[in-house]
Image: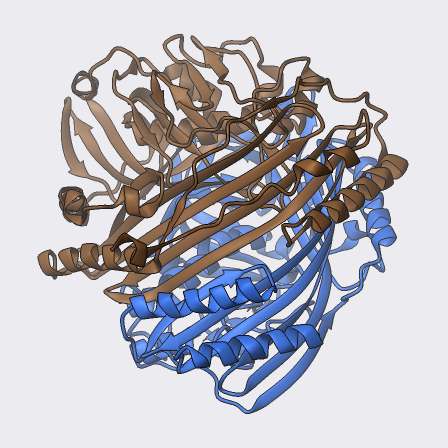
Chain colours: A blue, B brown
Amino acid sequence: MDRMNQLAQEILKEAKKQGAEYAQCSVSESEKKEFNVDGGRFSLMRTLFNRNVVITVLKDQRKGIVQINRFDADAVNTAVKDAIAAAESGKPDPAWQFAEGPVEKEFTDGEPVCDTEKLFMRTKELLEDIGKKHPKILMEQMITEHDSGRKVFMTTNGVTYRTHSGAYSFSLMYSAHEGEKATSFYGSDVTLKKLDRPVIDCAFIERDLAMVENQLDPIAVKGKFVGPAVLAPYALAEIALGTIMGNFASDSCLIDGTSIWKDKLGEEVADPSFSMSFEPYSEDVVVPERYTGEGYLTENFDLIRDGKLVSFALSQYGANKTGGKRAGNSGANMKVAPGNKTLEEIVAGIDKGILVMRFSGGQPAPSGEFSGVAKNSFLIENGKITSALSETMISGSVPEMLRQIRGISSDVLKDGSDSVPYIAFDGITISGT
Amino acid sequence: MKSMNERKNRMLQDVLSGKKRLFETGTHTELRGQKNRNRRVILLNGDVTGNVRSDVSGVSARVYRNGVYGFSSMAEYSADAAETVLRAATENADFMDKNAGAGKPALPVIPATQLPKPADIHDPAQKIYVDFAREVDAYIAKKYPGLTSRRVIATEDSMEKTLITSDGMDGHFIAPRSYLYVFLTAETNSGAPVDLFRAFGGKGTFDLNFTDASAICPQIDELYEQLMQKREGIYADAGEKTVILDGMMTGMLSHEAVGHTVEADLVLGGSVAAHNLGKTVASEIVSLTDFAHTAFGEACPLPVYMDDEGTEARDVPLIENGILTGYMNSRESAQHFGVEPGGNARAWMFSDEPLIRMRNTAVHPGKDKLEDMIASVDDGYYLINSGNGQADTTGEFMFGVTMGYEIKNGKIGKALLDTTISGVAFEMLKTVDMVSDTMVWCSSGFCGKKQPMPVGMGGPALRCRVKIGGR
C-alpha cells in the first residue's frame, strides 16, 4: 500500500506541475484465482496478477483521462502528459466538479484472502451436486473465482481512500438435455464472502436448475394475446430495471433530454407497491461501492418510493448539467422492495399468462417500448405453471407496465450485489405461432 | 505538422523468444506478450463528456497437461515476468492434472513456422479524435437544429501481440481498427423519442481512416432522413412474415444465429449443431464461411493470419449448399473431433486465455437482384439495420431491428419503429429462397463470450420467413 500511496502522490504532484487545476488517480493491484468448467468438465485454472492506474485531470475546465497498467516512472510520466494533452484538446465545461476534502478513509470489504483449495472443493462439489440432483443439466460453462485487490484513490482536493477487498463468485451457464432434446441456456450468478455452505444452496441456483430441467418438452403459445407476465428477477432486471436506469433516470438520457421522466420528479411513475433503491450498505452486499468516480462517499438512496419518482441517479456532473441533485451513489447495488405474496400465490391469481425467466430482446427504445423473446419461460393456466414454452415473443412499454403491477413476490433473489423479486405485470403482448 | 499530432507508439520488443528454452519438452506451451490500446472521445450535444486513452500490456503463459490447462498472466512485459507466468501456469496445470485430470493424450504437433514481422504503427494524438468528432458534431448541429440530441463517438482499439509457442507458428502482429459512431435522437409528434445510429470506419488507425469529415456528411444526411421517416414510423404487425434481410442483418444472422452454435466449445456444451453435422440445415442456395483474412478476392474487414495457439489461420466452411459441414475449433477441440484446427482460438487481452472465436463470418452472395427481391414481396418487411442480437445454443436467435420498412405489393412503404425479429436458425435458413448478388460487411462491434472480441460479419440480402415482434 505504501508504494501505491507514494505513486499516487507523485502522479498528483506531476499533474499539478503540468498545469492541472485538479487531478485524481486510482492506483490498484489485484489478483484473481479462477477455475473453468467447459462442457461439464474442468478445463482450466488461471492465476492473474494485475495493476491499474487511472489518472483524471482537469485543465482550464477540460477533462482528460488516461488508463495504464504499469507502475514504472516512464509509463506514469507519459500517462500524466497524455492526460494533460487529452484535456487540452477538449472543450471547457464548467460542470465538472469533484469531492472536496480533507477526508481520508480506509475500508476492508468482503474476504480479501483466497482459500484456493476450498474454492476448488466448492466448485467440484457444485458440479457433483448438480450431477446427482439434476442429471439432465449439462454445464456449458462454469467460472468460479476469487478476486482481491488493494486500491488507493487520491485527489488534489485532499480526498484519500484506501480499500482492500475480495470476494468469491460463481457464474454458471447451462441447459438441460435428453437425447436430441435441449433447452435454451440459462445463467445463474452469485457473489459470496464465505464458502461456508454448498453453493447449490445459494441465491436461486437450485430453484433455477430445477426450472430449466423442466423445460425439455416446450409447447408453443397459440396466436397472440394481451395478458399478464410474471418476470423472474433476471428478466425483470433486463426489461424494466435496466430501462429505468438507462433510458429514464441516469446522466446520459437526462443531459441529452431524451428521458421521458425528465419532468416527473416527485410524481407517481409506478404502482404504489413498487419501490426501487440503490443500497451499497445493505447487509446482502458483499463488496459495496464505497465512493463514486467523482470522489464522493456513497450512501443509500431511493429512486422510486411507493411508486413516486423521488430522485434521479445523477452524478455531480449530471446534476450540474441538468440543475438536478447528485444521487447518493452511482447506481450500484440495486434493490427492489419485496411484496407480501409468494411466487406460487401470485401465479395462483392468473388465469392465463406466462412466467418469463430470461429475456432476449432488442435495446429498448428511448420511450421504454420493448420487444423480444421470452426465454426459459412457462405458460400459466388457471393459477398454475403448466408447460414450458418455445419461441414466444413478448412486447410492451416499461412506463405503462410499471403502472400495471399485479403482484410483487416476497421471495427475493439476493446475488451478493442486487436484491430483486419476481413481479407480475398486466398488459404484456404475448405472441406465439 | 504531423509530428505534433502523433507520437511513435513503441512496439513490443522481443523479450520472449529466449524463453522457449524453459518450455517443458512434449508439453504444449504458449507464451504471449500483448498490448491493447484504446482511444475514446464522446461528444454529447457538443460537450466532451468522454476523453479517454488507455494502454494496457503484459505477458501470459498457458500450459497443457493431459486434457487440462494452466494459465497465468502479469501486468508487466519483461523477461522476468515471462519466467514468473511460465512457472505459475505450470503449477496451475499440475494442480488441475492432479485434481481433475482428464488423462488425454498430448495435442498433435504443428510444424514450427514464423509470421512475417508487421510494420510499425503510429499513435494519433487525442486532439485528432476530438477535432474530427467536433467537426462532424458541428455539421449536425448546424444543419439539423431540431434534433433532441446528438452523440458523436470517435474511437480506436488495437491489439498488438507477440506469440511464442512450443510448436506451431510464432509471430508478432498488430490489428488496429477505428470508428466514428453517430447517434441522432428526435421526437415523434406525440413527444416519444426515436433514435438511430450509424458506424463509420474499419481496420486501420483513426487518422488514416478519417481524413475528411465532409466525406461522411452525405451518409449523415441519409441517417437523418431515415430518422425523420422513423419519426412517422409504424409498429410492425406481430407474427411470422416474409422479409428481406439486408446485408447487415444477414451478417448478424451469420454470426449470432449460426456462428455461435458451430463454435466447437459450444457444440461440446450441447449446442444444436452437435446433432446436425452433415445434415441439411439451410436451403441449397445458402453457403456460409468463417473467413480468415481474404474473402471473394478481397481483404476481410478484420483479417486474422494466425491465432493465439500458433495455428495458421485458414477459412473454415460452415455451411456448403445448405449442408452443415464443419465447426470452428481450437487445437484441443480439433483433436476431439479429429480435424485440423483453422486458427479460431483468440484472446482479447494479455490476461485472457484463447477461446474459440469467429473471425469474418459471412453468407456467400447469390444471383438475385435486391430490387427484384423487394418487388417479389406482397406483404412483408425490408429490414436494414440492427442494434444488437443474441442467440441461443438451440439456434434460436433474436435481433433488435432499428431501421426497416414495410413492403406492400412489392413496394417499400412506411418506416418501422424499433422492433425485434426471432427464429430458429436451422429452420429459418431453410426458408431462404432468394439471395442477392450484393455483399455488405460490418466490423464495428464486439462479440461477447467470456471475453469481448472484434469480429467481422457480413452477407448479401436474403428473402426468408421470420417472426417479427409488434405491439
In the rendered image, the residue lying farthest to the bottom is: A102
Quarter of the picture holding the N terminus of chain A: bottom right
In the image, farthest residue toward the right: B98
Where does the image place residue A267, in percent across and percent down from the top left?
35, 77
Tell whether A131 sits left or right of A71: right
Residue A169 location (% of width, % of height): 71, 55
Q: Give the vertical position of B185 relative to A390 (above or below).
A: below
How many callouts does the rendering have? 0
Which of the 4 image quarters holds residue B401?
top left
Residue sitting at x 72%, y 50%: B80
Work out whether A426 lies above or below B273: below
Is B206 on the left or on the right of B107, as rendered? left
Q: In what quadrant of the picture does the C terminus of chain A appear? A: top left
Residue B292, compared with residue B226, is above or below; it is above
Q: Quadrant of residue B370?
A: top left
Q: Nearer the viewer, residue A429 or A280?
A: A280
Relative to B181, B310 lies left or right = right
Comparing B255 with B159, the one in front is B159
- Residue B251 percent location from the top left of the image: 37, 28
Query: Residue B130: percent from the left, percent from the top?
Result: 29, 59
Q: Is residue B323 visible?
A: yes
Q: Quadrant of residue A16?
A: bottom left
Residue positioned 59% across, 60% down in the render: A70
Q: Residue at x 30, y 59 (%)?
A: B4
In the image shown, does B144 or A362 lie closer to the viewer?
Answer: B144
Q: Nearer the viewer, residue A158 or A279?
A: A158
